[in-house]
Image: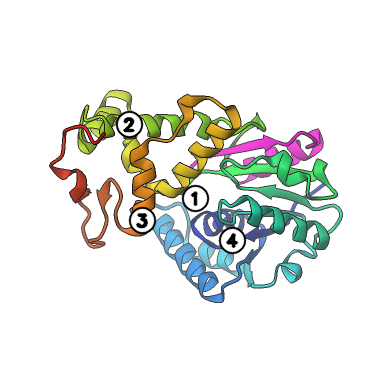
């Protein structure tokens, strides 16, 4: 089966990044969102990100214009998916929303279409169970920022067929990505390993062992991480981190996955990281390129317990 026509559900950070790479590599893309304003903002973001690629000699201006011409926007899912070969869902990380979306996709997409989710933690088996084509449902977990990061974590649901896995593996390679297949368990591999690391870094701050900058500097310089775990948590979104920790805690029933109380408190307070302007670092000055520790943590080194 040859994949040429793609639909992407959701035009946020992940959705517009996924649409970007598919269009860049020659696929016909329908980008779907309930908000027309969100779709226009997504096109602007894609254009700016392609300009960045042009400045790095990754793309030419002509290639950018061709790629943008391959993206069409829709606010009605039913219209956007009726002739698609592959639909990638990149909506908000909410199980009920995703299940509703997959029921709609199953009812309106062609029989041959593969339905993929970019979920970072929700069971592919559970998603597939609300469709009449569970063998054609698979996880296609891109990393942020999508145009830059090479990994695509491919997650097989309980009934995902080997043929569908191979097709999605080949599609990922066509995007110049590195596909890695894993099985459907809470957090898959990426977040089963990453989120407890971030949670432990938050505990280290909470217990007063070190400050924000110290923790991140040790992990960057000592462990060769390009970004410290607290800065990365801000980048991902602390609400997303908390949600995934709760998925791990519930899914494995192990107390080692219990989210740090400081993470819970920050989410409850609305300090979600980059998206809210405040997390472990202060992002309120959008013109500043300097990373500034949030006021709550800038002078405090003692335990927060």
Is residue 22 visible in the rendered image? The answer is yes
Q: Position of residue 29 (x, y in %)?
A: 65, 62
The reply, left or right, for residue 216 in relation to residue 40 is left
Which dot, 1 or 3, sits closer to the camera? 3
How far separated are the C-alphas under marks 3 and 4? 23 Å
Q: Which residue is label 1 attached to?
A: 147
**Region in magenta:** 147-175
Q: Foreground residue, 176 or 119?
A: 119
Q: Position of residue 80 (x, y in %)?
A: 72, 68
- Magenta stretch holds residue 156: yes
What residue lies at 63% left-to-right and 40% top-to-bottom? Answer: 173
What residue lies at 82% left-to-right and 60% top-to-bottom? Answer: 107
The mark found on residue 10 in the picture is 4
How far separated are the C-alphas under marks 2 and 1? 32 Å
Q: Position of residue 53 (x, y in %)?
A: 43, 55
Q: Position of residue 38 (x, y in %)?
A: 51, 70
Q: Secondary structure at mark 3?
A: loop
Q: Earlier in the sequence, mark 3 or mark 2?
A: 2
Query: In the figure, residue 120 lies in which quadrant?
Result: top right
Q: State if disc 1 and disc 4 touch (CB < 8 Å).
A: no
- Magenta stretch holds residue 176: no
The mark found on residue 203 in the picture is 2
Q: Secondary structure at mark 4?
A: loop
Label 1, residues with CA under 10 Å away: few <14, some 14-19, many ≥20: many
How far separated are the C-alphas under marks 3 and 2? 19 Å
How far separated are the C-alphas under marks 4 and 1? 16 Å
What residue lies at 29% left-to-right and 54% top-to-bottom? Answer: 278
| Residue lying farthest to the front in this orientation | 305
The mark found on residue 270 in the picture is 3
């Amino acid at each position: 089966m040859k994949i040429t026509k793609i639909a992407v559900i959701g035009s946020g950070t992940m959705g517009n990044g996924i649409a970007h790479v598919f269009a860049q590599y020659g696929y016909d893309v329908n980008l779907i969102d309930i908000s027309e304003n969100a779709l226009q903002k997504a096109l602007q973001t894609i254009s700016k990100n392609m300009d960045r690629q042009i400045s790095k000699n990754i793309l030419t201006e002509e290639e950018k214009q061709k790629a943008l011409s391959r993206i069409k926007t829709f606010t009605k899912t039913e219209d956007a998916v009726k002739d698609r070969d592959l639909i990638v869902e990149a909506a908000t990380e909410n199980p009920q929303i995703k299940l509703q979306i997959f029921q709609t996709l199953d009812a309106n997409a062609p029989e041959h279409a593969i339905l993929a989710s970019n979920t970072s933690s929700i069971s592919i088996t559970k998603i597939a169970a609300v469709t009449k084509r569970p063998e054609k449902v698979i996880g296609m977990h891109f990393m942020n920022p999508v145009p830059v990061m090479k990994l695509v974590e491919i997650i097989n649901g309980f009934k995902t067929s080997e043929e569908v896995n191979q097709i999605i593996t080949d599609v990922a390679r066509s995007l110049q990505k590195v596909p890695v297949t894993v099985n459907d368990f809470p957090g898959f591999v990426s977040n089963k390993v990453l989120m407890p690391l971030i949670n432990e870094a938050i505990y280290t701050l909470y217990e007063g062992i070190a400050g924000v900058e110290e923790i991140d500097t040790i992990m960057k310089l000592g462990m060769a991480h390009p970004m410290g775990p607290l800065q990365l948590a801000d980048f991902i979104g602390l609400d997303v981190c908390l949600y995934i920790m709760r998925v791990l805690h519930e899914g494995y029933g192990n107390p080692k996955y219990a989210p740090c109380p400081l993470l819970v408190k920050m989410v409850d307070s609305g300090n979600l990281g980059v998206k809210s302007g405040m997390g472990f670092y202060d992002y309120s000055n959008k013109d500043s390129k300097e990373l500034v520790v949030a006021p709550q943590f800038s002078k405090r080194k003692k335990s927060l317990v």
